[in-house]
Image (spheres, coloured by chain):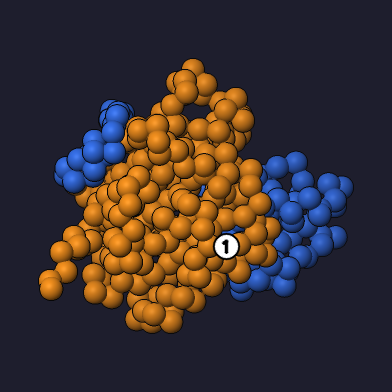
Amino acid sequence: MKQIINIQEKFGTELHTRQMVERLAASLNAADSYLLDMSGVMQISRSAADELYNLTHGNMSVDLINVEPFVEKMLSSVKLGRFLPRQRPATDTPIIHCETIGNVLQQLSAR
Amino acid sequence: MPDTTPKIVSFEDTLSAFFAAITTDAAPLATQFPILQAIISIYCQQPLEDIYQFALDDESASVAINRLKKNLQTCAPEQVKPLNSPLTYLLDELICNIQQHAQTDKGYAYLHHNAEQHCIDIAIADLGITIYGSYVAAQKHLDRLGDSDAEALNLAQNGYSVKNLPDTENRGYGISSNMRMVVKGLGGEFAVLSGNALLLYSQDTKKILSLPSEIDFKGTMIIVRIPDQVPNNFNLYTYTS
């Protein structure tokens, strides 16, 4: 029998930080199975979604139910990020060495 | 007698006035522009009423994020709904970065709606180990870093994380994705001051300044300006994966 955990009751309607999910993960027993009821969780950060992905794709039996649209989209972004190569610019951003505060002000005024 | 104090208008003006104020006695400039007072106060570790200082436990971080959004609700109620998702994304990731990397026990946040210039100015800061210090603490990318705060900023803005899983680059989105979202998606401007380096990213320019030795911020400060109108074609998910 899977245990149901109501995430809104535990954390509120927004999961802001990676630490929130880390704390949740630490409270689970590896020998048990869980359903995380995500109903009413309307916002999630990318970091928290990434940690939630780790939790649901790790060694423990943890699944999500009643995922709200915003959270679903953020989880999809995280999943995509896992499988697509990271996009980085072909050229490095220039590093400009400013010896004086005058050089800094000059660089800030130069478009 | 006419006021001859230079008028601070642009994002670059603000940063210029900040550097002038901390290296010379240009204090009068600071009274002109609210965010300038805020970033000077954080830099100089002087409390200012408008700066919200918060502990880094989950509850305090959540309270801080919600308080900043409430500030916006009060001063710019019409802008809150369209800005809610990008603003929450920005605050979540930047405050999460402090929790995960800065090795400090508190953060600082400031948000001000500048109605005259139709923009929202935000500063999120910590007095922690700097971005360079975070790479060194994790013993990551040391070959590229040398002793350079500027190289550390370069790595961070390209999404090189100190905490990726072994088989995937799942982290490092905090600064890199928010930079793109603010500048490309919202038409705003983004700056990061960490140690003695400044990253400046706007519509016209993207560069990293290695600053003179007299400027050495013991921490990391992200300074953002976002227009208060969200473009119709803005899509948050363009920037999250």
Residue position for label 1: B53
Q: Position of residue B205 (x, y in %)?
A: 22, 43
Q: Position of residue A6 (x, y in %)?
A: 73, 69
From the viewer's perspective, is residue B60 above or below residue A81?
below
User: Which residue is outermost to the top?
Assistant: B143
User: Which residue is outermost to the front?
Assistant: B1
Q: Label 1's element? A: strand
Residue at 57% x, 28% y: name it.
B136
Identity, as a three-letter code, of the amino acid under mark 1 = Gln
Q: How many marks?
A: 1
Residue at 23% x, 61% y: name it.
B8
The subunit letter for the residue under badge 1 reads B
Camera-side residue of A54 and B201: B201
User: Could you say which chain is coloured blue in the image?
Assistant: A
Residue A38 appears in the figure = yes
Residue at 16% x, 42% y: name it.
A110
Where's the N terminus of chain B, which quadrant? bottom left
Q: Is residue A107 left or right of residue B194?
A: left
From the viewer's perspective, is residue A95 above or below residue B236?
above
Tell me the crowding category of disc 1: few under 14, some 14 to 19, or many 20 or more residues within 10 angstroms, Cα based. many
Q: Position of residue B75 (x, y in %)?
A: 39, 80
Q: Is residue B180 left or right of residue A79?
A: left
Residue at 40% x, 36% y: name it.
B214
Q: Position of residue B51 (x, y in %)?
A: 50, 65
Chain B: what color?
A: orange
Task: Classify residue B32 by image quadrant.
Answer: bottom left
Residue A90 appears in the figure = no
